Image: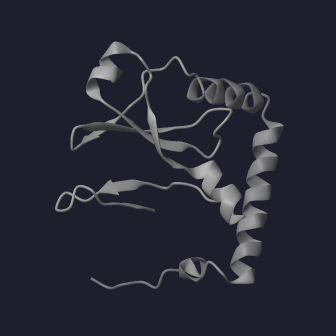
Amino acid sequence: MSHLPDPHQWLESLDDPAVLQWVAAQNSRTQALLDADARYAPLQRDILAHLRDTRQIPFFSEHAGWLYNFHQDEHHPRGIYRRSTLAAYRAGSQQWQTVLDVDALAAEAGKDWYLDGVAHCTVAPTRVWCT
């Protein structure tokens, strides 16, 4: 079995101006195609409305007796990582405690932060790392 060189490997250099220019051109080309499709704007609007609907049941993960959830809304467009107890969740009381406010962090640091994921350490459950 022979290994062929990857013709797109050069795109892995995220700080290379040529890569950034190529990506920007591809994004522009794709956006133009989407904008030209009459179905795009209403579909985008409907999808965003569903994603931002606060009436939806929040998905959570359980760690050390707490229920954790990542939430975005008009007040937190970058999102907040929050937690609640099972009793409060079952009661529908919405007593969420903010663990990490990505919008506040971005404003404080002057950077456009986003939360890519959270992993709870099972060996030391009081520790997490964010990516």
Hey, which quadrant is residue 72 in on the image? top right
- Residue beneath the point at 39% across and 15% down: 92
Residue reaching furthest left?
Answer: 123
With respect to residue 4, does 91 lie above or below? above
Q: Which residue lies furthest to the top in this view?
A: 91
Q: Quadrant of the C terminus?
A: bottom left
40, 109: nearer the viewer: 109
- Residue at left 72%, top 74%? 20
Residue 111 is left or right of residue 28, and the answer is: left
Counting from the top left corner in percent of width and height, residue 114 is at 58, 55
Judging depth in this view, the residue of 18 and 100 nearest the camera is 100
Q: Residue 90: where, in percent of width, then height? A: 30, 17
Identify the residue at image location x=27%, y=56%: 126
Residue at 30%, 30% in the rendered image: 85
Drawn side of residue 54 relative to residue 61, left or right = right
Q: Is residue 24 above or below residue 11?
A: above
Nearer-the-camera pick, 77 or 97: 97
Please identify the quadrant where the N terminus is shown. Answer: bottom left
